[in-house]
Amino acid sequence: MEKKNIDWSNLGFGYMKTDLRYVANYKNGAWDEGGLTADDQVTISESAGVLQYAQTVFEGMKAYETMDGRTVVFRPDLNASRMIDSAKRLEMPPFPAERFIEAIRQVVKGNEAYVPPYGSGASLYIRPYMFGSDAVIGVKPSNEYQFRIFVTPVGPYFKGGAKPIVIRISDYDRAAPRGTGHIKAGLNYAMSLHAIVEAHAEGFAENMYLDSATRTKVEETGGANFLFVTKDGTLVTPKSDTILPSITRRSLMYVAEHYLGMKCETREIYKEELDDFAEAGLCGTAAVISPVGKIVDHGREICLPSGMNEMGPVTKKLYDTLTGIQMGRIEAPEGWIYEIR
């Protein structure tokens, strides 16, 4: 497959239209057979459920070219499962997991010329999403839905290496107890936009949200889970029913324990503990790990011992190991790598 004539080394993290996308429609209680289309436009009623009541869920993952020239996707079965959970919570008809994975295969295969070459640092971002498409006025679930997947090549999240960021503890709440914080719904991200714009205006890269019930425990940022490394080398991640079950976080926990021999804990993390950690990071699909160098709590600076110059040593090992697995440099656990054929 001949690659597109793209300046791969200068790609940003943004949208570029590719050749094909996948579309399936739900009507009269069933999904149609779906398929690929070159049409990138979405036509829906002005009163569609997604526009009136934000009935939409989505996922995000990446395809990579490995060092031996294969095109692979990282753990799409977990994205399929999480999207089913998200759909159920918003009273949407789940798109079947086996069809989800097949649709991923079709879209990536159909746009394989856009998969950045190995060694470029870039990847093919995959965005499955679903929304209520028919007209509604009363507050109720839609009767019809559309499931779509588009892909776009994106550059490395960090150009020139990952530099530690400064974040703030936010006064805003991200999710309510027994709310929707644990699913990947568009509405969760919409409510975070004001908080992140405000944080950027004040010189911070991200927000650290605390639990809304007690405001004493660490939850997540607007779009990533937290991970912390203790001074004795234990990897700790927050336990909460209102944070998104990050696939990257779960993968890093496995890598830490089974590849690096680290002790791992998932537990409640109290704000008062932040001074005691040696390293911290944000983990998610886009960057894998974004190192945190400083946390600001209403003027009080919590400086991580790992500093502001580079990723901490333990975090770096985690990052290198997981990206090595994704790129085929390190043998993956069974079932983690889905090859596009």
Image (cartoon, rainbow, N blue to C red):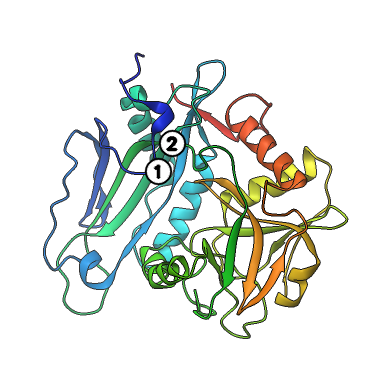
Instruction: Verify CB contact (< 8 Å) between mark 1 and mark 2.
Output: yes
Q: Residue at x 88, y 55 (%)?
A: 232
Q: Residue at x 59, y 85 (%)?
A: 213
Residue 286 appears in the picture as rendered: yes
Amino acid type indicated by mark 1: Phe
Left/right placement of residue 178 relative to residue 40 reads right
Residue closer to the observer: 153 or 83 = 153
Q: Residue at x 62, y 82 (%)?
A: 215
Q: Residue at x 58, y 32 (%)?
A: 326
Q: Mark 1 or 2 closer to N-term?
A: 1
Q: Residues within 10 Å of mark 2 (few under 14, many from 20)?
A: many
In the rendering, which numbered label is found on residue 155?
2
* Label 1 element class: loop
In the rendering, which numbered label is found on residue 13?
1
Residue 109 appears in the picture as rendered: no
> Residue 314's spot in the image, x, y percent?
76, 46
Tell me: residue 295, above or below residue 323. below
Amino acid type indicated by mark 2: Gly
